[in-house]
Image (cartoon, rainbow, N blue to C red):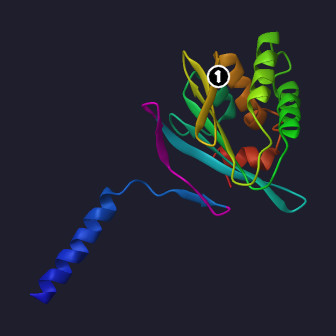
Amino acid sequence: MRRWSLGVIIFMAFISGAAAPACARAIAGLQFADTLHVQETRFTLNGVASYKKFGFPVLVAALWLAHAERDPGRILIEDMPRRYVTHFQRGVSSRRICRAWNEGLDANTPGASSEVKQQFQTLCLWIHDFRAGDEIAVTYFPGRGSLVELDGRRVGEIPGKGFADAYFACALGPSPSLGKGFKKALLGGS
């Protein structure tokens, strides 16, 4: 009887493991789910990246898409759902973040419309100084716009694809704000 019970336990453990959700990817002590749902839209983790300054960890970011994609041009051109989450590992001022976004906008979307530039300013008004553990998530939904969340709390929505393309280009464009290695990791490279 004991042998049969042990066999049942092993079988049940095997079945439970097979039915469990896909494993999360870990980086810098953080777990990022391989798939997630936001407002009934399914996202697949494309890549995760960490950024350090002078050897000190500053942030970790994750990019989720409707489907895996390694070509940054296709990500920015296609009108597909995308989600970019930044998890801060140390304090960073809102002024510094906004400066980096504006530099990224200038470098990667040089012909940005005045509307997109104003939308970046609106985003800057919504954020605060980030502390270790804080997160910002920007989720683009085609035909609707970008949902902005701070620490899981909705703070606003920015309409249109133009803003989303410019925001995601800061990390995925030809001159990524946090470097080419960071971009490569978000695209699924190491």
Residue at coordinates 72% horizontally, 46% vertically from top-left?
Answer: 184
- The kind of residue tagged 1 is Ile
Residue placed furthest toward the left: 1
Residue 13 position within the rendered picture, expressed as x and y whole percent measured from the top left: 28, 70
Instruction: Sort mark 1 into few (<14), some (14-19) or many (20+) by Cα contacts within 10 Å.
Output: few
From the viewer's perspective, tell me whether residue 71 is left or right of residue 18.
Answer: right
From the viewer's perspective, tell me whether residue 24 is left or right of residue 123.
Answer: left
Depth check: give the residue in front, 136 or 142.
136
State the image quarter where residue 183 is shown: top right
Residue placed furthest toward the bottom: 2
Residue 84 position within the rendered picture, expressed as x and y whole percent measured from the top left: 64, 38
Residue at coordinates 84% horizontally, 31% vertically from top-left?
Answer: 104
Please tell me whether mark 1 sits on a helix, a strand or a loop.
helix
Residue at coordinates 55% horizontally, 26% vertically from top-left?
Answer: 80
State the image quarter where residue 86 is shown: top right
Depth check: give the residue in front, 165 or 28.
28
State the image quarter where residue 107 is shown: top right
Q: Does the magenta stretch include residue 33?
A: yes
Q: Is residue 169 magenta?
A: no
Residue at coordinates 59% horizontally, 37% vertically from top-left?
Answer: 153
Quadrant position of the C terminus in the picture: bottom right
From the viewer's perspective, tell me whether residue 88 is left or right of residue 3.
Answer: right
Quadrant position of the N terminus in the picture: bottom left
Q: Mark 1 points at which residue?
A: 77
User: Is 158 drawn above or below residue 188 in the view shown?
Assistant: above
Residue 35 position within the rendered picture, expressed as x and y whole percent measured from the top left: 47, 45
User: Is 16 drawn above or below residue 99 in the view shown?
Assistant: below
Residue placed furthest toward the top: 114
Question: Magenta segment, which residues?
Answer: 28-41
Residue 165 position within the rendered picture, expressed as x and y whole percent measured from the top left: 69, 24
